[in-house]
Amino acid sequence: MRKIEHIGIAVKDIAAANSLYTSLLGSPPYKMEEVVSEQVQTSFFRIGPSKIELLSSNHQDSAISKFINKKGEGLHHIAIDVEDIVREMKRLKSQGFTLLSEEPKIGADNKLICFVHPKSANGVLIELCQTIKLWSMIY
Amino acid sequence: MRKIEHIGIAVKDIAAANSLYTSLLGSPPYKMEEVVSEQVQTSFFRIGPSKIELLSSNHQDSAISKFINKKGEGLHHIAIDVEDIVREMKRLKSQGFTLLSEEPKIGADNKLICFVHPKSANGVLIELCQTIKLWSMIY
């Protein structure tokens, strides 16, 4: 658990939200990326060593669409940077936390990710994420 | 806008949540503090250069109590560390953001704070915070 990697915010209109968060944070998103598997469009803003990720839905059945329909726009998840996601998943499982997948998945921004169920963490959706290193894919 | 200073999480039972987040993050809270003006009890966990703040209500009329009654436990606000809170408040006001106070207030953890209305920021309650320096109180 090395740092807050990013905070995910669910928004309806990502173009409008990009403009608003550019004003708020004082600099524009450094990256925009579609995550086809999650049916979302994302934008990333740097804030010191962390990021803010805006997420909008590309499909009415996406998790982000369902979240906004239920709770409205707003804070969606926090992502914590870990050195070894498999080790952390094992550790958390052994302590009774419920994980949303048995294996890490490939997420946005070149990460291996796994979510901890909000019921395990006082209603907070927590993402563990580990940066995929190029050398680990070559060797 | 220098870094994510902390993420605030609203919880019902702070003792149980302290235990859970100690397991999750791998280390216990480094500080617990009551904020009488806000009718809340807080706990702070370090995570790299940022913190996680748990907040529970000490009174049924507190903002945290109302939040939990409306939305349930979960992510409540994000706090952004700024160098000069008065300058940032002026900047945001001039760009159309709605602030919840005209002047900075004294918050938990030795900070000057000001909240940006969630309606200004896609449903996200954003706290600006500036660390109070001892020398600024002496000279």
Image: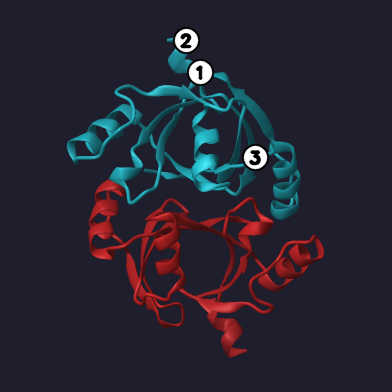
Chain colours: A cyan, B red
Task: Please state the horizontal and vertical placement of residue A122, each as a whole percent of the image.
Answer: 33, 51
Q: Residue furthest top?
A: A138
Task: Please state the horizontal and vertical placement of residue B108, each as a whole percent of the image.
Answer: 46, 74
Q: Chain of mark 3?
A: A
Q: Which mark is residue A134?
A: 1
Q: Nearer the viewer, mark 1 or mark 3?
A: 3
Where B133 sits versus A15, above or below?
below
Residue receiving disc 3: A12
**Horizontal side, residue B68 vs residue B121: left or right:** left
Secondary element under disc 2, as helix, strand or loop, is helix
Q: Would you call the spot at circle 1 few (<14 residues within 10 Å), some (14-19), or many (20 or more)? A: few
Residue at horizontal 69 percent and vertical 78 percent from the top: B102
**Amino acid at pointer 3:** Lys
Which of the two discs, 3 and 2, labels the residue nearer the N terminus? 3
Where B15 sits versus B39, above or below?
above
Front-most of A39 and B17? Answer: A39
Q: CA distance from mark 2 to mark 1?
A: 7 Å
**Horizontal side, residue B53 vs residue A55: left or right:** left
Which of the two discs, 1 and 3, labels the residue nearer the N terminus? 3
Front-most of A40 and B89? Answer: A40
Residue receiving disc 2: A138
> Quick check: marks 2 and 1 in contact, CB under 8 Å?
yes
**Amino acid at pointer 2:** Ile
Residue at horizontal 47 percent and vertical 43 percent from the top: A77
> Quick check: marks 3 and 2 in contact, CB under 8 Å?
no
Residue B83's image quarter?
bottom right
Q: Would you call the spot at circle 2 few (<14 residues within 10 Å), some (14-19), or many (20 or more)? A: few
Q: Chain of mark 2?
A: A
